[in-house]
Amino acid sequence: MSYSIIQELDNKKKAAVNKKLYEYNLEHFSDDLSGRYKEINLFIMDENNEVCGGILGEICWNWLEIHVLILDEQLRSLGFGSKLLTKIEQIAIDNDCDFVKVDTLSFQALDFYKKHGYQVYGTLNNVGREHQHYYLQKNLK
């Protein structure tokens, strides 16, 4: 048998790789956590039904991971980010998550997350040659 390495944008192949990792991981988690995966997406909409921001995340086993939190410039500092974060944290609690994890860059929302009780557990320097990449966690229990 021969093997090759290819570079390709293919959703079917990507899904196959993700499925292999998911199945492998299942072997190492307790049975009560199996099947615990759910996307959580919250959006801020204007009166014209246009998206002005939102928070995108997923529940995976015993945590919620935030992938994206963004607001249009004119909505920043009006409390919408805090409302989105509070709402997704409540969804995590309602789904028996133990913690929330998120990452942010030094020019993004580090102070925002710290203000909401998140703690840095890891940092990468020299990101974009001049920034830091922060990894944060907030325990819910």
Image (cartoon, rainbow, N blue to C red):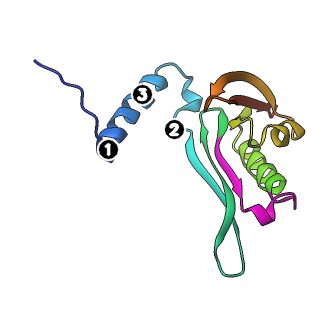
> Secondary structure beneath disc 1?
loop
Where, quadrant-wise, is the C terminus in this rendering? top right
Q: Which residues are magenta?
A: 66-80
Examine the structure image and report whether residue 72 is included in the region drawn in magenta.
yes
Residue hosting label 1: 9
Left or right for 14, reference 71: left
Q: Earlier in the sequence, mark 1 or mark 3?
A: 1
Please name whichever residue, 88 or 33, is drawn nearer the observer in this view of the structure: 88
| Image quadrant assignment for residue 116 | top right
Q: Earlier in the sequence, mark 2 or mark 1?
A: 1
Structural distance between the alpha carbons of marks 1 and 3: 18 Å
> Secondary structure beneath disc 3?
helix
Task: Inspect the image, locate mark 1, and give the three-letter code of the amino acid beneath it.
Answer: Leu
Where, quadrant-wise, is the N terminus in this rendering? top left
Please name whichever residue, 44 or 29, is drawn nearer the observer in this view of the structure: 44
Structural distance between the alpha carbons of marks 3 and 2: 14 Å
- Residue found farthest to the front: 129
At which x and y percent is residue 83? 82, 56
Residue hosting label 2: 35
Left or right for 89, reference 24: right
How would you rate the neighbour count of disc 2 (Cα within 10 Å): few for under 14, some for 14-19, many for 20 or more?
A: few
Residue hosting label 3: 21
At which x and y percent is residue 122? 71, 21
Task: Inspect the image, locate mark 3, and give the three-letter code of the amino acid beneath it.
Answer: Leu
Examine the structure image and report whether residue 81 is included in the region drawn in magenta.
no
Camera-nearest label, 3 or 2: 3
At which x and y percent is residue 70? 69, 54
Left or right for 21, reference 11: right
